[in-house]
Amino acid sequence: MKTAIKPRRPTGSPTHSTRVGQPSLHNTAADYAPRPVHRPLTKFENHGLKLGHGVWDLIFTKK
């Protein structure tokens, strides 16, 4: 019997939907932003990437 594998949902999804609903914040990307060059790669992020997990950044600015 085969089991269906659920695709991983970005852990930031609840955060993303909460922030998008805030009228005082503006999302700098259409959805998730690529990792900014000024932000260093963390050991946790690096470990997740080695395991094939996705990494998503949320970058908001005040309006």
Image: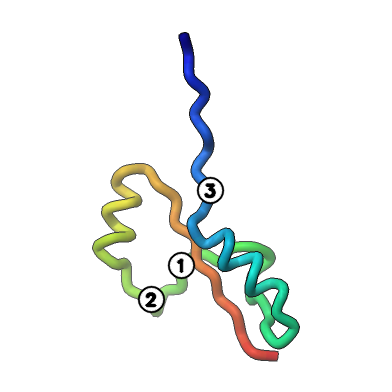
**Residue 27 quadrant:** bottom right
As drawn, 22 above or below 56: below
Q: CA distance from mark 2 to mark 3?
A: 23 Å
Q: Give the left or right position of residue 51, taking residue 60 as reference.
A: left
* Amino acid type at mark 2: Arg
Marks 2 and 3 close (CB-CB < 8 Å): no
Q: Is residue 60 above or below residue 14?
A: below
User: What residue does disc 1 label?
Assistant: 35
View extreme (bottom): residue: 63
Disc nearer the start of the sequence (2/3): 3
Residue found at the far right of this picture: 23
Name the residue at 29% across, 57% down.
Answer: 46
Q: Find the distance from the CA under tag 1 to the CA under tag 2.
A: 7 Å
Q: Amino acid at mark 1?
A: Arg
Q: In the drawing, does residue 22 fall left or right of residue 11?
A: right
Amino acid beneath label 3: Arg
Q: Secondary structure at mark 3?
A: loop
Residue picked out by circle 2: 39
Does dot 1 land on a helix, a strand or a loop?
loop
Q: Residue at 70% x, 90% y: name it.
A: 63
Determine the residue positioned at 33% across, 51% down.
48
Image depth: mark 3 or mark 1 in front: 3
Judge whether 59 appears above or below 53 on screen: below
Please identify the residue farthest to the top as the structure is shown: 1
Q: What residue is disc 3 on?
A: 9
